[in-house]
Image (tube, rainbow, N blue to C red):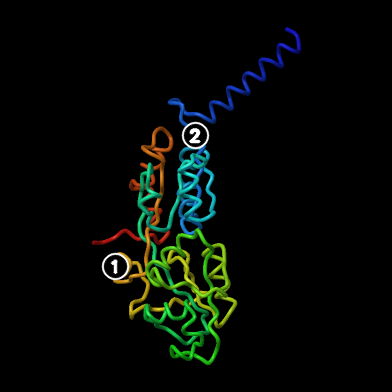
Amino acid sequence: MNSKYIIGIIAIIAIIGVAAFTFTSDGSASKIDIVGSTSVQPVAEKLAETYQASHPDVKINVQGGGSSVGIKTVQDGSSNIGTSSKDLKADEKKGLNEYVLGNDGIVMAVNTQNSVKDLTTEQLKDIFSGKITNWKEVGGSDATINIITREEGSGTLDAFESIVMGKDTKIKSDAIVQSSTEAVKQSVKQDPNAIGFVSFAHMSDDVAALNIDGVAPSESAIADGTYKLQRPFIFLVKENPTGQIKEFIDWVMGPEGSKIIAEEKIVKASK
């Protein structure tokens, strides 16, 4: 047997091996790309990590980019699953199936040195629009309020604008823009006069959460709807999923996935 023939056989085996990894028995991809919301990204990564541990033949790649990117990439087929941390508009829903993991609170985070503990929704609107510019106007120290916001395309920004700002009021143009919920939190942590909105699922004690309209952000207040600043965490799939995509989605929405979602502080509605 000559060397060229042996090399040819080896190449064919390698191609078959790659194909066996890339496709399941029904022809569906065993590599799953999940793209979208940076707020949803950590829970998506945890779900992917746990699923792959018991399904070693499946490779799941999770990326951020924002909710708008998640919606676009699943619509054009460049990702298998898009993630969103905002409700989709009618034109965004076309051809997509939505799987709601649960609800996440939008926490108004301030530096731990800030003496302000409670704001109304109207005060929030006035702060982020620039009508209120000093913490003393809301019971705090005499210091300029530094606003931290998110980039266009962020589901957290979209939800905050919808709930707090309304259609006719814009966030002030000189607000500091950050590209992820974690970056907002770090900015607030480093600035005693900053305020920003972050995911409840990402909160930690290095920043302080404000009560809004007298209600503290908590799992129970998010679940029963008394904490109003909240939005859904959504997986999006084009049309009806099949093969490995369907198996993964079914697992996510089943008991094992639901347990992980709850551990990551994503809250199921109680009413």
- Image coordinates of residue 206 in percent, x first then y, are 52, 74
Q: In this view, does 224 lie to the left or right of 142?
A: left
Which of the pair 58/130 is nearer the observer?
130
Q: Which of marks 1 and 2 is in front?
A: 1
Residue that lies at the very extreme toward the left in this rendered image: 271
Residue at x-position 47% and y-position 41%: 80
Please give the residue where the numbered disc 1 appears in the rendered image. 225
Q: In which quarter of the image is the N terminus?
A: top right
Q: In which quarter of the image is residue 2?
A: top right
Examine the rendered structure and indicate whether residue 102 appears above or below residue 115.
Answer: above
Label 2 CA crowd tier, 10 Å (few <14, some 14–19, many 20+): many
Residue at x-position 31% and y-position 68%: 220
Q: Is residue 8 left or right of residue 229?
A: right
Residue that lies at the very extreme toward the top in this rendered image: 1
Examine the rendered structure and indicate whether residue 70 appears above or below residue 183.
Answer: above
Q: Is mark 1 on a helix, strand or loop?
A: loop
- Image coordinates of residue 135 in percent, x first then y, are 49, 87
Among the two numbered marks 1 and 2 on one chain, the one whose residue lies closer to the N terminus: 2
Q: Which amino acid does label 2 sit on?
A: Ser
Residue at x-position 53% and y-position 92%: 142
Figure disc tally: 2
Please give the residue where the numbered disc 2 appears in the rendered image. 30
Could you say which disc has been placed on residue 106 in the image? none
Q: Which amino acid does label 1 sit on?
A: Gly
- Image coordinates of residue 27 in percent, x first then y, are 46, 26
The Cα–Cα distance between marks 1 and 2, rounded to whole angstroms, is 38 Å
- Image coordinates of residue 254 in percent, x first then y, are 33, 46
Residue at x-position 38% and y-position 78%: 211
Q: In which quarter of the image is the C terminus?
A: bottom left
